[in-house]
């Protein structure tokens, strides 16, 4: 995330307060030194104080660890030289305390520890060999520098921990916002999917209704129209030709029975479960029972067929058998269901009458469109010496 790599050295309120306190301490020490000592003796200490103030108020863009360490080392060397030349005084204590605390605050822990250790060792050496201080003074001085280091190091650790906590909190907040956006997008996609599924279901219902309406219109509608026409002519035929009237009445009765049979077939097909190859065989058996035709059904397919492809095969078989009954004048039909490496093949043959070349009507065109919609194809050809063959092919899919 972009803000996670922002410069961590931008001073906050606590840093500005600490800088102000150090400034007051250094300024007060410099004024005291200038007021109590001769000018030529006070100038080196004042120069050290000015160097510390420059380090303290260094612009943020220059506050890099190596720059701070180099500047502090220069002031440290000047302090040690001033100590050797003028002896130990309060200015040297203040400068050493400031350098230890400032380097610890801005430089990585490993480098600040080395700087503090070097300052402590050099100071103890000068205290012992130059100033002649005893063990008690050496211990106090060493513990003072160590205390300043630990105090500033602890403050830095707490500050880094707070900064890390704030950064993690910001990252978690951004991640939470991204998750909320993803959830909203998923919810919207779910609603769109539900709407699409509902539209698909409505389309399937309308398609099935259209098919049933076409079946009723083609079979029952034509039959009832013929019945009405003959019944209207029947009174005149009774008066003019009673024998023809009886024959017409018998014909009307047969047509009405055929219409009733078609109605029962449509209702039966609407309630028929066509799951798997069992549904296909059941459709063929019911057709043979209703029509009186000999229907031979055989399947050489071992893998499971997906429900949507079973539905396509069922509708094609249903339409093909209906066409045989209506137009072929056949006495037998043969259905073969087989599978190859990448496709499913269903073949429907009859021994009836077929025109050559075949001119697809509404039923055959509907079967072909259904196959192509499912990614397959439908081939129609005549069989020598008589009969018609339909070959439907669908691509194999995992069930």
Image (cartoon, rainbow, N blue to C red):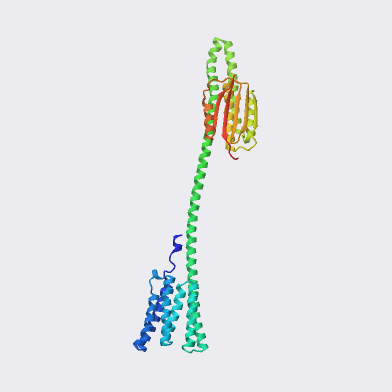
List x then y, in percent, for residue 207.
Answer: 52, 33
The image shows residue 173 at horizontal and vertical percentages of 48, 60
Which sits in the foreground, 50 or 290? 50
Residue at the spot x=44%, y=78% of the render?
A: 99
Residue 312 position by quadrant: top right
Would residue 115 be found to the left or right of residue 243 on screen? left
Whether residue 209 is visible to the viewer of this picture, yes or no, is no
Residue closer to the observer: 83 or 53: 83
Number of numbered callouts drawn = 0
| Nearest the eye: 344 or 285 | 344
Residue in the picture at 46% in, 74% down? 105
**Residue nearest the observer in this picture, 234 or 49:** 49
Report x, y in % for residue 41. 37, 87
Image side of residue 331 versus residue 61, left or right: right
The residue sitting at 48% across, 50% down in the picture is 185
Asked if 73 appears above or below 86 in the picture, the reply is above
Asked if 350 appears above or below 8 in the picture, the reply is above
**Is any part of residue 236 visible from this angle?**
yes
Q: Is residue 364 above or below residue 166?
A: above
Task: Please name the residue shown 52% across and 88% down the image.
Answer: 136
The quarter of the displayed image where residue 264 is located: top right
Residue 11 image position (x, y, % from top left): 41, 70
| Quadrant location, the C terminus | top right
């Amino acid at each position: 995330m972009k803000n996670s790599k922002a410069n961590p050295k931008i001073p906050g309120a606590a840093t500005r307060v600490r800088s102000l306190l150090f400034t007051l301490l250094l300024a007060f020490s410099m004024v005291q030194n200038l007021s109590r000592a001769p000018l030529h003796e006070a100038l080196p200490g004042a120069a050290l104080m000015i160097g510390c103030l420059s380090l303290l108020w260094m612009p943020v863009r220059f506050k890099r660890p190596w720059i701070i360490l180099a500047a502090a080392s220069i002031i440290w060397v000047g302090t040690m030289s001033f100590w050797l030349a003028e002896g130990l005084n309060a200015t040297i204590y203040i400068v050493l305390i400031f350098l230890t605390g400032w380097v610890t605050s801005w430089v990585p822990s490993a480098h600040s520890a080395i700087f503090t250790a070097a300052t402590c060792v050099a100071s103890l050496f000068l205290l012992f060999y130059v100033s002649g201080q005893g063990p008690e003074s050496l211990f106090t001085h060493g513990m003072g520098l160590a205390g300043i280091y630990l105090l500033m190091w602890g403050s830095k650790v707490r500050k880094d921990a707070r900064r890390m906590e704030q950064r993690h909190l910001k990252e978690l907040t951004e991640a939470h916002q991204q998750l909320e956006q993803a959830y909203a997008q998923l919810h919207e996609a779910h609603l769109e999917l539900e709407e699409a599924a509902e539209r698909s279901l409505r389309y399937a219902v309308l398609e099935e209704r259209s098919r049933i309406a076409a079946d009723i219109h083609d079979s029952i509608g034509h039959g009832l129209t013929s019945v009405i026409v003959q019944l209207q002519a029947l009174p005149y035929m009774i008066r003019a030709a009673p024998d023809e009237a009886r024959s017409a009445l018998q014909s009307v009765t047969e047509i009405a029975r055929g219409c009733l049979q078609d109605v029962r077939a449509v209702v039966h097909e609407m309630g028929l479960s066509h799951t798997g190859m069992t549904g296909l065989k059941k459709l063929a058996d019911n057709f043979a029972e209703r029509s009186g035709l000999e229907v031979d059904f055989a399947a050489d397919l071992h893998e499971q067929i997906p429900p949507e492809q079973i539905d396509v095969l069922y509708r094609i078989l249903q339409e093909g058998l209906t066409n045989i009954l209506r137009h072929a004048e056949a006495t037998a039909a043969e259905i073969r269901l087989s599978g190859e490496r990448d496709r499913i093949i269903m073949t429907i043959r009859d021994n009836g009458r077929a025109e050559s070349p075949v001119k697809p009507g509404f039923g055959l065109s509907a079967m072909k469109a259904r196959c192509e919609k499912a990614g397959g194809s439908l081939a129609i050809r005549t069989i020598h010496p008589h009969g018609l063959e339909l070959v439907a092919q669908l691509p194999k899919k995992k069930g």
